Amino acid sequence: MIGVKKKEDEFYVLLREFSSKIVVVSETLQDFVNDYTDVENKAASLKLQETECDVMTHNILTALNGSFVTPFDREDIFEITKGLDEIVDLMEEVGSRFIIFDVREMRPPARVIASLIVQCVKELDILFRHLHEIKKNNIAREQVIEINRIENEGDVIFRSTIHDLFSHEKNPIELVKWKHLYEQLEGCLDACENVANNIEGVVVKYA
């Protein structure tokens, strides 16, 4: 039984380490948009972190493939892991798109949405730190609600931002660029909510 418990704990630890790493990536993205200087090196840092997260994804899936004992359904662990990887991929892609589009000046709404991404990722990290307690308390469920709230706030800001963009931007190239960039940023929030919703499914099954 001790061996079984150890194997179950392994997945909680791996997921917790992954979520903590994603906090670092989100803070790197926030620094990218808040201090829009030395952008190529900052984008390279995001790419390096994304590669490191790919390794973490691989390690979790390798452990999953080689384990007969898991703390909850294998399919749920797989979906949650791939969802975390998707968050990182999207954040890295945001950085690369600013370079590809040759953006010369950052716009305030991007900073606002980036701040919400950090908030969302940090709430997700709290969720993973308490995931092993889903049978003991409601912390995981409460975190899911908070992540949904932040994502909804992001939706409101995103829609208002897109409306303002189409109302005031006269340069069609800039309009296309920024519409895409705002969509990419908002997609990071959606990806966080998707992971939270997957975990909510686990909570419903096992709480």
Image (cartoon, rainbow, N blue to C red):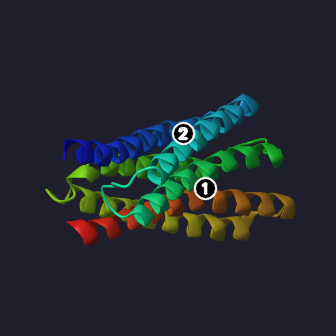
Q: CA distance from mark 2 to mark 1?
A: 14 Å
* Secondary structure under the numbered disc 2 in the rendered image: helix
Give the amino acid at mark 2: Val
* 39 sits to left or right of 78: right
Q: Residue at x 57, y 70 (%)?
A: 159
The quarter in which the C terminus is drawn is: bottom left
* 13 sits to left or right of 130: right
Q: Residue at x 57, y 48 (%)?
A: 88
Q: Residues within 10 Å of mark 1 (few under 14, many from 20)?
A: many
Of the two numbered discs 2 and 1 on the same chain, state the one appearing first in sequence: 2
* Secondary structure under the numbered disc 1 in the rendered image: helix
Q: How many marks?
A: 2
Residue bearing mark 2:
25
Residue 172 screen position, x and y as percent? 85, 64
Give the amino acid at mark 1: Leu
Q: Residue at x 75, y 49 (%)?
A: 97
* 140 sits to left or right of 82: left
Residue 73 screen position, x and y as percent? 36, 64
Residue bearing mark 1:
185
Residue 91 shows up from this direction: yes
Classify residue 30 by image quadrant. top right
